[in-house]
Image: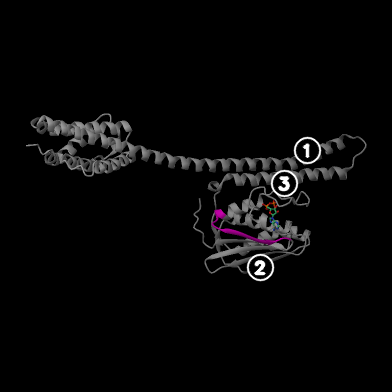
Amino acid sequence: MTMDFSTIFRQKRDAIIERWIESVFDAQQIDATNQLTFEAVRNSLPKVLDSLAVMLAGDRTDKFKAVDEASIEHGIIRADQGFEPAEIAREYRLLRTVIFSALEEDLVQSSPRDLLWAIRLIDTVVDEAIAQCFDSYTQSRIEELEQLQTQLQLTNQELTRLIRASQENMSKLTHELKTPLTSIIGYADFFIRQQQKPDTKDTELQLESIKRVLRNGRFLLRLINDTAQLQQGDGHIKLNMELIDPKVLVRSVREIVEPLARTKGLDLRVDCDRAPQQVQTDALRLQQILTNLLSNAIRYTEKGFVELAVETHQDHRWSLVISDSGIGIDQSAQDRIFEPYFQVCRSSTSDAEQGTGLGLAVVAQLVELMQGKILVTSKLDHGSTFTVTFPIEPTISNA
Ligand code: ADP
């Protein structure tokens, strides 16, 4: 009578699994199991053994289908668990040893023909399992590498973009610094040459050169200060949030910009009728935002008005609306005016009023930091409106 290996195998299945798991845990050369639980190591092995039992029963209708499915699953899990290929090969070698030693007694009692048939079948099934397992393991690893590669490509693109942007900013900055510096050197040089001439002492002319040196020096300082603030990065700007009356702040900013508007004969209007009583803000930063926007409005308006309105909204927000009847901003430039050093066209005004191209970049940075939003609407030759909206009580804690 031929031996029923399938039944014997089924009876010993759990013992085989247990012994195999123990030997996998004990194997010095399989490190991946150090962090794993019993269940995790066991994973789809019972399925591999069940399909082996089916095949030992002589049922070869589905051939290796069940073995293949179980081994594919095993490979994916092992890849996920961080097994090395050599470790997988070792765990299968152990499986073969465990199966044969569990069946040893029964095998030696069977006929030589049955014995050979069973050994060949077990070997073939284990080999097939190894092949499928490696296949799916490699596939998982390739997918993992592809994901990693995509991620790396994205990071690389972002880094390249950042480097290019900072290179562009750097070359714009050097360009911006060059003009006032050349001017300072030129006027200082002229002043010294005038001084060295014994007879011609035109004090008026000399005074004018010193004034220009001073103006350009101040402009340089502004440029450097604004650049330094932008370079600080959002994480390093400390806000000092406090409850203030926006009308008081508006009054002090008005005092700063009024002389500029007066010099240009502009009508400076301020409307605080709809202003909130109190807002939570960083007063100094808010003053910086407002001064920048108002001085821009004045700088780019030759006639007419500059208006500041403070408004309260229903949704616990409030706005500062700065409008002017100035030169306006072309639609295509409106998206770019918040970029550092971007200027629609260099103003023809005197160097005392010259813009740095950094004002709006600083404003945008501060507005975002204070959880606000800035919007611009403008029509060329008709004027511009900048609207800055903040929460009345932003969720910012003092650093
Ligand atoms: P700048 O120091 O040159 O004023 P900003 O960053 O403050 O730099 O502004 C960027 C550019 O946006 C300006 O050069 C100017 O062309 C344009 N701009 C800003 N505000 C106004 C405005 N109120 N009216 C027209 N153009 C403006």
Question: Gap in Å between the C-alphas at discs 2 and 1?
Answer: 45 Å
| Amino acid at dot 1 | Ile
**Residue for badge 3:** 219
**Toward the viewer: 331 or 329?**
331
Q: Position of residue 244 (x, y in %)?
A: 57, 61
Q: Residue 182 vs residue 288: left or right?
A: right
Residue 177 in which image quadrant = top right
CB atoms at circles 2 and 1 under 8 Å apart? no
Number of other residues with Cα within 10 Å of mark 2, as a class: few under 14, some 14 to 19, many 20 or more: some
**Residue for badge 1:** 185
CB atoms at circles 1 and 3 under 8 Å apart? no
Label 1 sits on a secondary structure element that is helix
Using the image, tell me which numbered label, if any, was put on residue 271. Answer: 2
Q: Position of residue 265 (x, y in %)?
A: 78, 62
Number of other residues with Cα within 10 Å of mark 3, as a class: few under 14, some 14 to 19, many 20 or more: many
| Amino acid at dot 3 | Phe
Task: Confirm or reject: label 1 Cβ below 8 Å from ligand 1.
Answer: no
Picture layout, residue 383 above or below residue 67: below
Using the image, tell me which numbered label, if any, was put on residue 373. Answer: none
Q: Position of residue 308 (x, y in %)?
A: 67, 64
Question: Gap in Å between the C-alphas at discs 1 and 3?
Answer: 14 Å
| Amino acid at dot 2 | Asp
Question: What's the magenta region?
Answer: 368-380
Label 2 sits on a secondary structure element that is strand
**Toward the viewer: 175 or 43?**
43
